[in-house]
Image: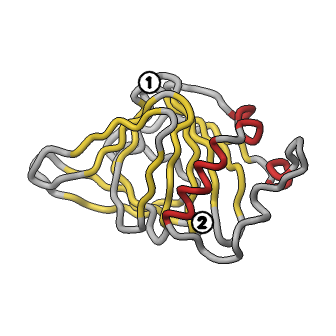
Amino acid sequence: MTDTASQADTAREVPDGEQPFTALPERNLDKRELRTLVDGLAARPELWRGQVAFSDTERHYASLYRDEFVDVWLLCWTRQNDTGWHDHDLSSGAVRVVQGVLTESNPRIGGEHLATAVGAGSSFCFGPDHIHRLTGATDDAVSVHAYSPPLWRLGQYDITEDGLMRRISVSYADELRPVDAPTAA
C-alpha cells in the first residue's frame, strides 16, 4: 500500500482562497450529499492532481481531508488493483471517477455477480448496507471517494465458489484486497 497522508490544511490552501471543506455542515452527510461533494472535488484537480501515482502491486491512495463527520480520499488504480468484496461498516459513501474506468461489482449469491463500468465523469453513491468490489478497468484510473461518518472499520468478504460468504472486520487503514489473495511482501 502506498499512502500519502495530506494535511487538511494543505487541502484548504487553494489558489483562489476558497476553502472547499469549511462549507461542509457539522453533521454526518447522507449519500447524496457525499455524491455532490465528490462531484465538486472532481472539478478542483488542483486539490488532488499532485497526489496521483500508480502501482500494479499496491493501490496508491491519499487522504485529502478528514474530520469528525467526513473522510475524503483519492485512489489510483491499474488493472491489477482489486479491493475484494467489502462494505463500509456504518458509513455511507460516494465515488467519482475522474480519469480512466473502474469496474464496480455487486455480489449475487447463487447467481452471476453484477459488474458495471464506471468511466471518467461518472459517480455513484451508497449507504452502509452496500457490499461491492472495485477493480481498475484501465491502467490509469483515478477516483475521489467520500465517506460519512468517517471510515473506522470495514467488512471484507470471502465468497466461495459454492456461495458461502463470510465477513472479516478490518481497519480503514488496511489496504483492501481480495481475502484469499496473498499480501505483498
Q: Amino acid at mark 2?
A: Pro
- From the viewer's side, name the closer residue of 95 and 56: 95
Vertical relation: 160 (above or below) 117? below
- From the viewer's side, name the closer residue of 63 and 49: 49
Question: Where is residue 64 shown, x and y percent of the image?
Answer: 71, 49
- From the viewer's side, name the closer residue of 85 and 96: 96
Residue behind mark 1: 138
Question: Where is residue 48 shown, x and y percent of the image?
Answer: 71, 39
Residue 86 horizontal side relative to residue 158, left or right? right
- Kindly state the secondary structure of the residue where label 1 is placed: loop
Residue at position x 51%, y 32% from top?
77
Q: Amino acid at mark 1?
A: Thr
- Kindly state the secondary structure of the residue where label 2 is placed: loop
Residue behind mark 2: 150
Residue 176 horizontal side relative to residue 70, left or right? left
Residue farthest along the top direction in this orientation: 139
Residue 60 visible at all: yes
Vertical relation: 63 (above or below) 76? below
Residue at position x 66%, y 43% from top?
62
